[in-house]
């Protein structure tokens, strides 16, 4: 017997994300705000050169910067 999330065409990771969002939205105001803050992620990466780690960079910031540079290049 297949799981309901598989039958719906979801991956298990996506199923968990949807379930967590539903639970967070069902909470009262203060606990909901605290739970939403815990649900946020901040991914970081660092470029390694010659065996040495470079500066840690936020993935969201790097992505936004790359998108802005790409848009600027397309305008020219």
Image (cartoon, rainbow, N blue to C red):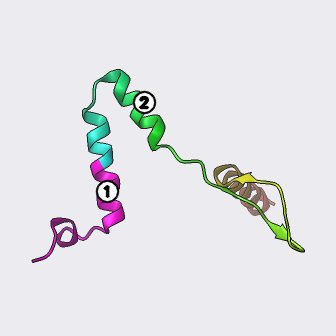
The residue at which mark 2 appears reads as 34
Q: Which residue lies furthest to the left in this view?
A: 1
- Which residue is more in the foreground, 53 or 29? 53
Q: In which quarter of the image is residue 33?
A: top left
Question: What residue is shown at x 59% (from left), y 48% (from top)?
Answer: 42
Q: What element carries label 1?
A: helix
**Dividing the image into 4 quarters, which one contains the N terminus?**
bottom left
Q: Which residue lies furthest to the top in this view?
A: 30
The residue at which mark 1 appears reads as 16
> How many angstroms separate mark 2 from mark 1 (CA)?
19 Å
Q: Describe residue 2's horizontal placement relative to residue 33 as left or right.
A: left
Q: What element carries label 2?
A: helix
Q: Read off the magenta span.
A: 1-19
Q: In this view, does 31 lie above or below 45?
A: above
Question: What residue is shown at x 21% (from left), y 71% (from top)?
Answer: 6
**Dividing the image into 4 quarters, which one contains the C terminus?**
bottom right
Packing grade of label 2 (10 A; few <14, some 14-19, many >=20) is: few
Question: What residue is shown at x 40% (from left), y 35% (from top)?
Answer: 35
Q: Describe residue 72's horizontal placement relative to residue 25 as left or right.
A: right
């Amino acid at each position: 017997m297949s799981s309901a999330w598989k039958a719906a065409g979801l991956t298990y990771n996506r199923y968990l994300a949807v379930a967590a969002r539903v639970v967070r939205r069902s909470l009262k105001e203060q606990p909901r705000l605290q739970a939403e803050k815990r649900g946020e992620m901040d991914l970081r990466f660092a470029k390694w050169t010659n065996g040495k780690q470079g500066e840690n960079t936020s993935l969201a910031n790097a992505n936004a910067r790359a998108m802005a540079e790409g848009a600027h290049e397309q305008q020219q």
